Image (spheres, rainbow, N blue to C red):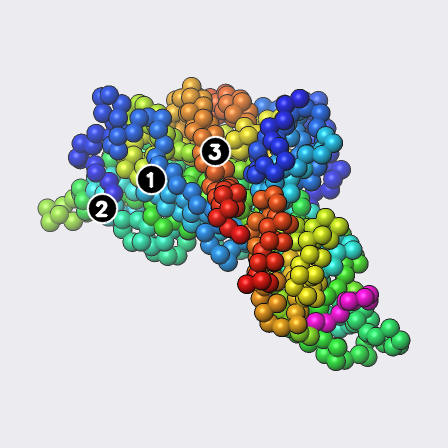
Amino acid sequence: MSVKGKELTLISPDGRRLDGRRPDDIRELKIKAGILENAGGSAYVELGNTKIYAAVYGPREVHPRHLALPNRAVIRCRYHMTPFSVEERKSPAPTRREIELSKVIRESLTPAIIVEQFPFSAIDIFIEVINADGSTRCASIIAASVALASAGIPMKDLVAACSVGKINGVLVLDVTDVEDKNGEVDMSFAMMPNRNEITLLQLDGVLSLEEIERAISMTSKACKEIYEKQKSALKEKYIELRKAVEEGART
Amino acid sequence: MMPKLKRQEIVDLLSSGRRIDGRGLEELRALEIRCRTVKNAEGSAEVRLGKTLAIAGVKTSVGTPFADTPNMGVMIVNAEFLPIASPTFEPGPPDENAIELARVIDRGLRRAGMIDLEQLCIVPGKAVWEVWIDIYALNHDGNLMDASALAAVASILTAEMPKAMVNEKGEVMINKSEKQKLPIKSIPITVTIAKIGDKLVADPSLDEEEVADAFLTATFVKDNVCAIQKRGEKSLTAEETLRALQIARQRARELLKIVKEVVGSG
Amino acid sequence: MPIYVKDWDLVVPGEVLAEGDYVAGPYVYKEGNKLFATVIGIAEIKRGVIRVVPLQGPYIPKVGDVVIGIVVDYLPTAYVLDINSSYKAILQVAEILPPQKEVNALAEDLSKYLDVGDVVVCKVVRFDKYSDVVVSCKGKELGKIADGRLIKVSPAKIPRLIGRKGSMINLIKRETGCKMMIGQNGFIWIKGKDPASEVLTEKVIRKIDEEAHISGLTQRVQVMLQSEKRG
């Protein structure tokens, strides 16, 4: 949806964005872990209106066999958007964008997985975008890390992610679709928050080196807050059950 | 499969500030750019970066604009890693690496505004110039990304396309005998830095790519960055990222001078 | 030397558990001065060693493990078993033959002893992560299972199901009168005197699976078994 030719106040004089957020506010983030029964691990994420399911299968046998690695697990990732996730129906066939994002998301999660534990095996990560409103790859990474952890796959850290945009010269966090299409910059960023290591960095748009440094600092802070939400989501059902037992609600 | 011995050799040399081919950490390989090598293409360039060889071709045609940009020409970038370039490349449609390369270079060109797409409008909403940039890897000895990006840029800078005009009936007539250059607004330069252990090296060779933990590719236009792509299965710290960008920017400035010289001279 | 967790605390990957001279136990790694958890689980601190007991996770075969597998394929002289792992298990026909029999493996008709779909209790005799798991049925209580029911739980919960020195599993066997075999790979075989006792045992196993992270489980299981028997 492009609104060229129509004046869009993406950011008001007092710094409020279209949805009322301040530049360094991220949208409301809801995370549910373990919601798909059959998958080894799973998660559902809502980042504003961006809605994502992530599922993990494995470690399991690699088919075809010749793709297996003798000293570590093979990580495979499929990022896919449902046809109804965008305003104009998108064909279900994988697009070049989905192929690139599948690679980029895989490379953002692999650094966190202790792959040496599972030689000759594959760990499959599936991401399905149900509704797209900007920052889908970041929301996907948030979901996929939770799914991997809920599967009990050993990881050095979770991976949290948050995008940065630039509107009228102002750096903003967590861009929506409108902000992405009409703003000047779209930067995708993911990191292992307890290790301070960047696992995803893409920039599409013009930034000075100084702005990049500032953007990284802004989004790193947001990623640490996102990690706390991922942590709560993973612990949620266990803590609720523990509370119920301690209150004697169960025999 | 790289023998462990070689892997160790590369890493050990790096710890004393040297590279396996004798280069300095931030040094690029020997660069050769040849333009206008393909007569049938509107633009073309072959780039040799060390032993890596990539060729880019520009073709133009008249087409319809996208609905949401009725006054702008269309630019499409494609890339293929030919099986002749490496024993590891198999015939077939572009794989994720080729697709990624094409999209990264596309973003660099587009965000730098290299081609002034508004100048490529013939009849608003109806007819515009389409610029097809096709990149082919011919020999892979590391850093196909930068070689391909240079080839794309050089082919665009030296391209000569026909002129188009609209006759009284409103039809678009293409005049092949009258040539024009593509409307250029800027020259983006792409540089890739590889991280090996805690060392950052510019323009990784094939051996270095196999050992590297991660890569940072950045496209520069007028000292600013217009595209970045982190690649690889490991991570980078913020400090390494910013340091890599500094190194890349230095190399980009030098490459820009070389490109201008080559293109200027013919 | 700061420590940020205590026994029974729920932790997730990347959580910093402590800093300083602690030793990293299973599912914990140390980098620089910090100790990090690698899985979702319960923290356990004992004599300066910090470990995490996972609540989820795949089964990683270990020599000596008793596992329950399902026959899925034949090789010329062996059966291929699915043991709920990314590695298949190989059971040579010689390892399931009655002890006195002379073995000419190639001449044997494999389907005489086991069919595809049969359930087998066996022991892991060899595994080095780079090749398939080798199992054997030579031993007491190992071999084909013909009746009873099979229950699947997360392999991570098996230690809890067994309990310290078998305290939990012995409690269940005693109270329900069921025969039980526990596979380290997450499969449990039970056979009771009647369906009711099997249903009860399965209920107890599910409870342990769900409440493994809450202390006092043995007591709760005891209470449950006694009240179910009365009611």
Residue carrying label 3: A228
Q: Which residues are magenta?
A: C137-145
- Badge 3 element: helix
**Residue type (three-letter) at the residue carrying disc 1:** Gly
- Badge 2 element: loop
Residue carrying label 2: B67
The disc, 3 or 1, on the residue closer to the chain's N-terminal end is: 1
Task: Measuring from the top left, give residue B188's x and y in whole percent.
Answer: 41, 29
Q: Are marks 3 and 2 on the same chain?
A: no
Residue carrying label 1: A48
Q: Is residue B255 above or below residue C165?
A: above
Distance of mark 3 from mark 2, alpha carbons? 43 Å
Q: Tell me, yes or no, whether the two marked residues, 2 and 1, touch with CB atoms within 8 Å.
A: no
Residue at (58, 62) in percent of width and height: C230
Q: Chain of mark 3?
A: A
Task: Measuring from the top left, give residue C93's x and y in whole percent.
Answer: 79, 72
Q: Chain of mark 2?
A: B
Q: Residues within 10 Å of mark 1 (few under 14, many from 20)?
A: some
Residue at (19, 47) in percent of width and height: B126
Q: Residues within 10 Å of mark 2 (few under 14, many from 20)?
A: few
**Residue type (three-letter) at the residue carrying disc 3:** Glu
